[in-house]
Image (cartoon, grey):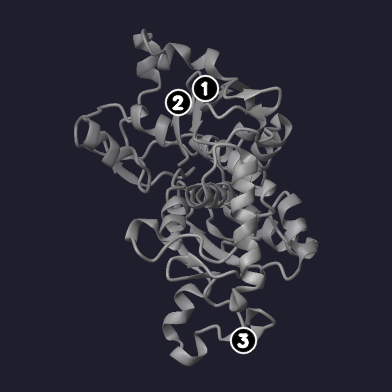
Amino acid sequence: MIRFLTSGESHGPGLQVIVEGFPAGLPVNKAFLESELSRRRRGYGRGPRMKIEKDLLSLWGGVRNGLSTGAPVGMILENTEWEQWSQVLHPLETDPDATEAKRVSFPRPGHADLPGAFKYRHRDARDVLERASARSTASLTLAGTLARILLKQLGVAVRGAVTSIGDVSVNPPENENEWTRAMSSSMGLPRDKEKEPVIREIESAARDGETLGGTFLLSAIGLPPGIGTYVHWDRRLDGRLAGAIMAIPAIKGVEVGGGFSLASMKGSSSLDEILPSGSSWTRTGNLSGGIEGGMTNGEEILVTAAMKPIPTLKKPLRSVDISTGKAMTAAYERSDTCAVPAACVVGEAMMAWVLGEMVTEQFGGDNLEELKAGFQKSLERREHFFHE
């Protein structure tokens, strides 16, 4: 079983990630971890912080000479802004004047400010927003990238592509070249011609002081049938994927395969028929998104996520002062106009995490070679399933 824990705040000393349960012998490439963190900062319409963040990564344990040892993997991302925030957020002693200057009493609609302050009895929502900040997704990206490295060793690829921003929709990738383009694109788009309409949409929103959401498609290929289970509600693959992706800040919807469109179809047209193919089988389509009964069915896993517009606005909406109850306008923290391309990268990481988690649960192994052997045997079973 693998798991990860994170700690740290947006403007604190840094972010900590501890990943437990990875098999020994996994190649851990720091440059690849850093490249995924860089992809998380991508996108047109990002705020000024993307130019400030440097994602200074250090590996603190569980890795020796580039290989995992089986011990918990510790990683730290240092905050390059910590010096100017230390008087406000120091763990042991803060400066009263500096703290008051950065006090947040007017919660932003759509953010964690108000329910978080209520839950923990804070009168300064700074204690909430620092942890609830989208900066925390850097930690998710690190943990998910470790899982992506593990999946690569098994021949499993996880991809992502932006499919809409605001009112501008984009067709999903139709071939491997377009998936590659989407992964390397600064906007997460599968085709160059789609960039200009998206940029115009973002620029229009920025001029109006607005923010934009959108959707992105996640894909995984190379998994054998049967990953997940139908016998326990909390171990169903689709449930765990949906939960992990919904845990990304600002994600408000997740669908697998045909998703909500299946609700308006007749049963006969909503299903992927099964046809014989040698000693195995093939399907007539993939409306199920590669998951049936909580398990992989051998087809490409397809999951779409919907991101709401960022709740921090340059033209703040109405709010209240949580200290007095008086009507106010919401606080403003520097913000992006659109972060959908970045959220897509985090979505890839969380999909990789769940798949890595379930693969290690199913096939076990304290070292990479044991895990590979069990995984490969499952792949080979499909090829002669009817003649076992």
Q: Which amino acid does label 3 sit on?
A: Leu
Q: Residue 387 carries which label?
A: none
In the picture of the structure, the residue carrying the numbered disc 3 is 275
Q: Where is residue 64 in the image (x, y as percent from the top left)?
A: 66, 22
Front disc: 1 or 3: 3
**SS state under label 2:** loop
**Residue 338 in view, yes or no:** no
Q: Which mark is residue 14?
A: 1
Q: How crowded is mark 2: few (under 14 residues within 10 Å), some or many (20 or more)?
A: many
> Compared to 72, does 270 lie above or below?
below
- Name the side, left or right, on which 315 lies relative to 190: left
Q: Which amino acid does label 1 sit on?
A: Gly
Q: In which quarter of the image is the C terminus?
A: bottom right
Q: How far apart are marks 1 and 2 (CA)?
A: 6 Å
> Which quadrant holds residue 7?
top left
Q: Do the residues labelled 1 and 2 touch (CB within 8 Å)?
A: yes
Please tell me which residue is depicted at 35% across the width and 47% down the height of the picture: 109
Mark closer to the chain start, 2 or 3: 2
Q: Position of residue 148 (x, y in %)?
A: 63, 45
Front disc: 2 or 3: 3
Toward the viewer: 271 or 203?
A: 271
Please tell me which residue is depicted at 77% across the width and 64% down the height of the picture: 176
In the picture of the structure, the residue carrying the numbered disc 2 is 8
How many numbered marks does the figure carry?
A: 3
